[in-house]
Amino acid sequence: MATNRADDILLLQEFRMPATREKAFTTIIKKYQEKLYWHIRRMVIHHEDANDVLQNVFIKVWNGLENFREDAQLYTWLYRIATNESLTYLEQQKKKSAVSIDSESSMASQLKADKDFDANKIEWKLQLAIQELPEKQRLVFNLRYYDEMPYEEMSRVLDTSEGALKASYHHAVKKIEDFILNH
């Protein structure tokens, strides 16, 4: 994922000045909202839920951007917040579920309920296979496959070693291949 670090540094400088704060924040939202939306959506599945989580992400960004230390790139920090908010949302959904249904399975059920669902189409099989993955593997797979995030960057977002991420991705790919071949 290529972002212009110089542009982000300028945006952060503008955000820190009261006169240009809102304009800079609006620019940050416009620049990153679509990428963050799809990152969140692949985790929480439903559009409405993804929008709610994204709104929470931008509230946290607004509240925390003043203190952003720029140790990492802006998009890395944004992805970390989006990832944490998505995982928090999924955890809340698990707790709300009165019956102890496996949340990954219920997400697969939600996918199957989609009016456009066609189990014979490869893209639907891929989505079902992804939903069968454990949360961490699903997250790593989505970041690598869809967002094409390098392991080094992913390591900063998820605070995990590159080796562990490569192993998670490898296991996820193997499980997805097995699912697609056997379903």
Image (spheres, grey):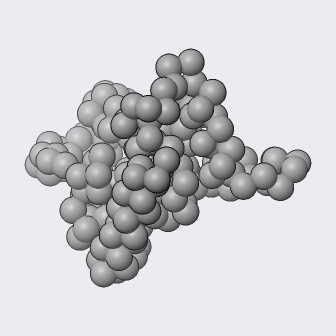
Image point (68%, 44%), residue name = 106
Q: Is residue 97 above or below residue 137?
A: above
Q: Nearer the viewer, residue 108 or 64?
A: 108
Residue 92 seen: no
Q: Nearer the viewer, residue 150 or 63?
A: 150
Residue 26 seen: yes
Q: Is residue 52 above or below residue 61?
A: above
Q: Position of residue 122 (x, y in %)?
A: 36, 37
Is 105 placed left or right of 174 in the picture?
A: right
Is 112 placed left or right of 96 in the picture?
A: left
Residue 140 figure quarter:
bottom left
Is 153 placed left or right of 116 in the picture?
A: left
Q: Nearer the viewer, residue 62 or 112?
A: 112
Q: Nearer the viewer, residue 23 or 130?
A: 130
Image point (59%, 32%), residue name = 112
Image point (63%, 52%), residue name = 104
Q: Position of residue 40 (x, y in %)?
A: 47, 43
Image point (30%, 73%), residue name = 166
Q: Position of residue 110 (x, y in %)?
A: 63, 34
Q: Position of residue 134 (x, y in %)?
A: 55, 63
